[in-house]
Amino acid sequence: MTRLHRLLLPVTLALALAACSGEQGGQQSSSNAPADQAAAQKGPAMVGAARLDNADGEPGNWMSGGRTYSGQRFSPLKQINADNVGDLGLAWHYDIADAKYGQEATPIVVDGVMYVSTDMSRVRALDARTGKEIWSFDPEVDGSWLQHVCCGFVNRGVAVWNGKVYVGTLDGRLIAIDAGTGKQVWSTQTFEKTRGYTITGAPIVVKGKVIIGNGGAENDVRGYVTAYDAETGKQIWRFYTVPGNPADGFENKAMEMAAKTWSGEWWKNGGGATVWSSFSYDPELNLLYFGTGNGSEWARSVRSPKGGDNLFVSSIIALDADTGEYKWHYQEVPGDEWDFDSCQNVILTDLTIDGQARKVLLHAQKNGYFFVLDRETGKPISIEPFANVNWSTGYDLTTGRPNLTKNARYDDRGKPTMIIPGASGAHNWHPMAYSPDTGLVYIPTQVTSFTFAMDPRYKPKKLTSNIGILFEPLTALDDNGKPVDPPKGPPALLAWNPVTQKPVWRVEHASTNNGGILATAGNLVVEGTAAGNIEIYRADTGEMIWSSPAQSGVVAAPMSYEVDGEQYIAIAVGWAGTGALGSASGVPVNVNRVLAFRLGGTDKLPPMPAAPVRELNPPARTGTPETVEAGYHTYQRYCGGCHGFSAKAGPLLPDLRYSSALGDESLWLSITSDGALSANGMGAFGAELSHDDLNAIRAYVISRANDAKEQ
Ligand code: CA
């Protein structure tokens, strides 16, 4: 095929699709696609509104996180299919040489070039045929800001527009990079560093505006979404997701409405509801869709003492994409106090439900329910559990509200309460996919629980974790005083029918925190696993038909593209996220790579690197049992989130049991109290914890190290 043919092929396809559909979008495609293709000849990532609106007309490209604005993560390519997938082999692998903290991004491919963000907010451009690096961009994240990041130094992807690649950084910059040279074009600081914000999510570009949210609802932040001019980085609009101090006046009517659902002085600690994962967009309705995170603090009785729904915590929100004006909201978890973020990807499609054609929005929440909403109005069409839940008995569709069980609200119960699913969710941020061919949604699910109890010593803190509950292993008792067993059961890839709201098939996995999903027209569903494999299933039946070792735990979602008439399936591997901070994957080392597969691919991964052998050589036990016990509680509150609860870390951040500072009190205090390692992301706790507190933590970690050595 000549270069000219390659360039013309997508145009021909777009024209054919436009002729078939007869819809307005299709007509736009026929008039604008040639201009876009001409733009494509001018340089890399020359993507405009017409190309993004009609991304389905370019099945070989994957131009935004969910491939199209609908966020379906479905590839219409079928060169690789259920009949020939046995011939699938590695086409190329790219070692992310400077990566340490794991990979969560879905790569983007435009006109034969792959753009992928990696940990520490870095970005690579690779030749999508060979994996050869074209450029590498490092925003040099401020290491001292890393201590405010809750859940890994990761990034979930880039966006492209008019020759530029956009990435949000952990320290809050939105950066435009020249897609051809990898050089920075502009950079805008998106938050003030007076509160514990961070960015790990992917931006979206809609009609020349780059839209980005932020994270930090476990800290002290007020969530918002901002649109910036894609050419200049200048702010165009901002929409807050929770109200600020009423005395300062409300930004808009939506905030005035939301403020009626709060009480007390919620704004002091921010309120939360951050938009930290991804966006979807409907060009016809011109609506931007996203979910919001948990409230800050987690416990409602702390952040809003008289109760209330606390809008727009744990909600789906639709905004006018041009102005950021509020259009509708649907709150999935009124008055959330279980960390039920609505952070999962939003999928848009059209379904026939009860004989009626509906424009729907699909969402599989942390809380275990699958939501089918009317995306024009936000009204729920159906809501059913896809997982085991104990916090509610279902939803009332007329009010749209859940029916809570007796003990669901733990904040006034006075004893630990086990909630199913737990804070990790029945489905977390790992993207699900939808196949229009099978009509099924493919959800990476897990069985989780969390035992909630109020923290009697809780005091709000600046910039750092502010959840208001105990974060340590607790035993929940039922109403008869008997210990409640946590739910058991393997995590599973679940194929779900969104019309009948019933499971169709499920494939069980060995361990939790598995990867996001790709569905293809080749009747394939692709997923990376925590056990360290890339697996492919028949989309219609769930039969496993292909598997290959990834040499790393995988949490990111795969994607597919075509270059020179060849289809590829690509994925970033590298164990990451909250699960990775506390535990290892099924693979003893963490190799960070991008892998691409094609039919007949003959590339081979190098041999697995040997797992590092480290000798545990702690100093002698120190401190009284009471000191060690006090150190245990302080450790859980201040250290466990990053270094592992019970002082046993995952592979990404230091396992303190091995720390050479354990036997050197002055070194220990210089780090933990004075911030000697703050440039590496280690916090300084001298303002909040006394030397006695910090030495008690040291005594506790020494005792854990000795326990492990004596085992
Ligand atoms: Ca959360």
Image: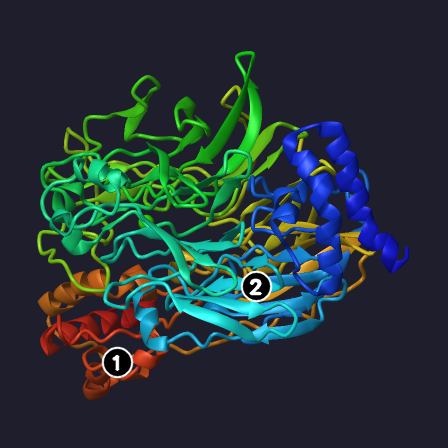
Q: Amino acid at mark 2?
A: Val
Q: Amino acid at mark 1?
A: Leu
**Figure quadrant of the C terminus:** bottom left
Tag 1–tag 2 contact (CB < 8 Å): no
* Coloring applied to the structure: rainbow
Mark 1 / mark 2, whichever is N-terminal: 2
Image side of residue 430 versus residue 2, left or right: left
User: Residue 506, can we see it?
Assistant: no
Image side of residue 402 versus residue 163, left or right: left
Q: Quadrant of residue 376?
A: top left
Residue annotated with mark 1: 662
Q: Residue furthest right?
A: 1
Residue annotated with mark 2: 165
Q: Nearer the viewer, residue 626 or 71?
A: 71
Which marked residue is nearer to the observer: mark 1 or mark 2? 2
Percent across and percent down for residue 700 are 21, 69
Q: Nearer the viewer, residue 245 or 92?
A: 245
Residue 588, compared with residue 445, is above or below; it is: below
Residue 223, compared with residue 690, is above or below; it is: above
Percent across and percent down for residue 87 are 81, 49
Image side of residue 265 versus residue 199, left or right: left
Which residue sits at x=15%, y=29%?
Answer: 479
Q: Residues within 10 Å of mark 1 (few under 14, many from 20)?
A: many
User: Residue 260, can we see it?
Assistant: yes
| Cα distance between the residues tagged 1 and 2 | 44 Å
Which residue sits at x=30%, y=51%?
Answer: 223
Which residue sits at x=48%, y=71%?
Answer: 186
What is the secondary structure assignment of the residue under circle 1?
helix
Q: Residues within 10 Å of mark 2 (few under 14, many from 20)?
A: many
**Figure quadrant of the N terminus:** bottom right
Determine whether the beta carbon of the residue marked 1 sits less than 8 angstroms from the nearest atom of ligand 1: no
